[in-house]
Image (cartoon, grey):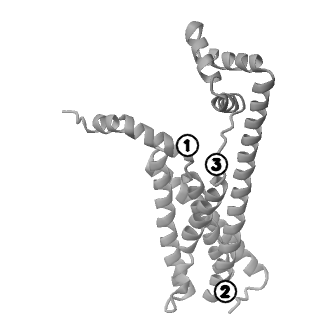
Amino acid sequence: MVSSQPTTNLEQEHQPERIRNRLEAEARGGHLGDAMLGAIDGGITSFAVVAGAVGGGFSSLVVVILGFASLLADGFSMAVSNYLGTKSDTEAAHQAHREEQRHIDEVPEGEREELRQIFAAKGFDGDTLERIVETISNDRELWAKTIVQEELGLEPGDAGQPLRAGAATFIAFLIAGLIPLLPFLVPMLTPSQAFLTSIGATSAAFLAIGILKGYALDQSVLRSGLETLLTGGGAALLAYGVGALLRAWLGGGAVA
């Protein structure tokens, strides 16, 4: 007997109230992508620094100093980059929106024809097409927004969106980036023991981040988890190899 639970859940998600809440949340702009990017990059960056330092024969104190310096500097840099990029996109969308409003005021018939052709390309025609054009063109804000979205692929966001995007990236970067460093803060662990503990903790974090990403994007959670784990592991292995090679090339001396 086939369970009706999935269908029931799907029907619940498509009740009017659920649909309205979901659309409002999407309109405000979600930052799951920013957080996922920050977490993955934070974990990879921090663990790569740890692996490179251990491969170079440095002490736990040096690993912690290098790790935290990299964590804060790289996290801030990534957050600022995301903030500026999102801010530029938002400003471009608002500029295009203002420009479309000017066009509507100066050449309304030409802008109506743009609407007509946009929705004709979607398969509408005849009276239905004309009603769509008439309805949208009766609202100047909606008219400009529709053309900006359909013609230019831009979505005017609210003023706080870039700041929230940068904050989500920075916080996720710090949380994930701390995980590889924590074992080196335990005094009774040798650098080798701390490194092995860091490998296990970071691998579990990469797997969890990948699974969460797969779940959020409705992809295979196992494949997404393994993909993130292998990506992070590959970066760490590369960093460890570079540290070990440089240590051997420079005479094998370790910094105490």
Q: Which residue is mark 3?
A: 158
The residue under the point 71% across, 90% down is 255
Label 3 vs label 2, nearer the camera = 3
Residue that carries the numbered disc 2 in the rendered image: 62
> Residue 167's quadrant in the figure?
bottom right
Q: Which of the labelled discs sits on residue 78, or is there none?
A: none
Task: Report the number of discs.
Answer: 3
Res 254 → quadrant: bottom right
Look at 48% across and 72% down and name the residue there.
Answer: 201
Mark 3 vs mark 1: which is more N-terminal?
A: 1
Q: Residue at x 60, y 71 (%)?
A: 47
Looking at the picture, does residue 145 appear above or below residue 217? above
Q: Nearer the viewer, residue 64 or 60?
A: 64
Residue type at the position of mark 1: Ala
Element assignment for label 3: loop
Work out whether residue 52 or residue 126 is closer to the camera in this orientation and state it. 126
- For the N terminus, the quadrant is top left
Crowdedness near tag 1: few (<14), some (14–19) or many (≥20) residues, C-alpha within 10 Å: few
Pick the front one: 210 or 133:
133
Q: Residue 70 appears at what percent x and percent y?
A: 69, 74
* Residue beneath disc 1: 27
Q: Is residue 56 visible?
A: yes
Q: Quadrant of residue 150?
A: top right
Task: For the C terminus, give its image quadrant.
Answer: bottom right
